Amino acid sequence: QEYLALKLKVKEWAPEAEKLIKGNVPDDANIYFVPATMRPETMYGQTCCFVGPKIVYGVYQVSDRDYFIITERAARNMAYQGVFAENGKFPKVMDLPGSSVIGTLVNAPLSAHKDGVRILPMETVLATKGTGVVTSVPSDSPDDYATVMDLSKKAEYYGIKKEWAGLEIIPIIKTPSYGDLAAPFIVKKLKINSPRDVKLLAEAKELVYKEGYYQGVIMVGDFKGEKVEDAKPKVRKQLIDNGEAFAYSEPEKSVISRSG
Ligand code: ZZB
């Protein structure tokens, strides 16, 4: 699995995380949440970034001043992909519970929301996939759309401000069958009411992914008017060249479980 790992720089900490971080990480450090994505061309549509509230993340020092917030599993993989200063080493500064970072404001590269987006909870984030951090594009990801709807409806229950989950969902990809907000269209069409409708959401994801990839046209940014298929590698390269992202690949799970 070849992902793009995106660097979302912390602008303002949630109070609980701030208390934990203080004294453990230098004040002038750059700290990033690092979601892994398969869809770089959708980064224009980021409206928030998800962590698993029950997942414990690590803060890892990748260079003099730069730190990443990811799962230990991802840090170990990255240590063999030239991400850290020394091959095979992934120095952890501290643990950070997912629940403590909810509400943190981060800068999301390419997002139309230039003031930043919030870190929000998603119960279905897998600790065993990617970096355990998932950037949210509700216009084109059914899981993300179902989750932000649920978060808005039950903001108090989740301990968040409703407006954090309610950032405008901007059309970024036009498709012939599902219009220019494919994920909301499909979620409504399949009558998905909850982010826990995992079976229907898997079906929705498949449909939206195929339609977007093969029929979609980009509506915003430097590659506006191009087919998704063509724009995808260009957006990826642009993010990498700008130092806002890097390639991250994951060993095949099946191989590990078979040998183990
Ligand atoms: C942004 C995005 C925009 C994504 C979209 C999808 C879509 P795959 O293909 O099954 O491997 N993801 C990444 N890590 C995790 C995790 N730990 N737990 C749960 N979800 C995770 O799926 C890759 C996608 O799964 C990634 O790409 C990420 O969401 C999510 F418009 O990033 B994506 C139709 C899908 N659209």
Image (cartoon, helix red, strand yellow):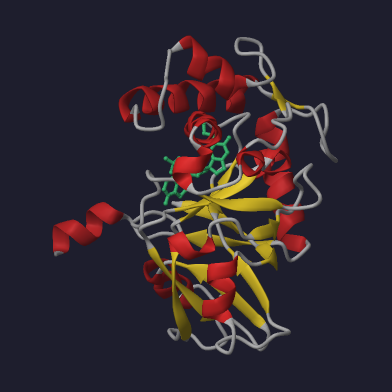
Q: Quadrant of residue 157?
A: top left
91 vs 10, nearest the viewer: 10
Could you tell me which residue is drawn at 46 percent across and 45 percent down?
A: 158
The residue at 67%/23% (across/down) is 216
Residue 102 lies, in percent from the top left, at 53, 57
- Most distant residue in the front direction: 156
Left or right of residue 129: residue 185: right
225 to the left or right of 234: right
Say which residue appears at 59% left-offset and 56% top-offset: 103
Residue 155 image point, x, y percent: 52, 39
User: In the drawing, does residue 59 fall left or right of residue 177?
Assistant: left
Front residue of 75/170: it is 170
Please provide percent x and percent y for residue 39: 59, 41
Q: Quadrant of the C terminus?
A: bottom left
* Residue ID at (82%, 37%): 223
Using the rendered view, name the quadrant where residue 218 is placed.
top right
Say which of 55 and 1 sits in front.
55
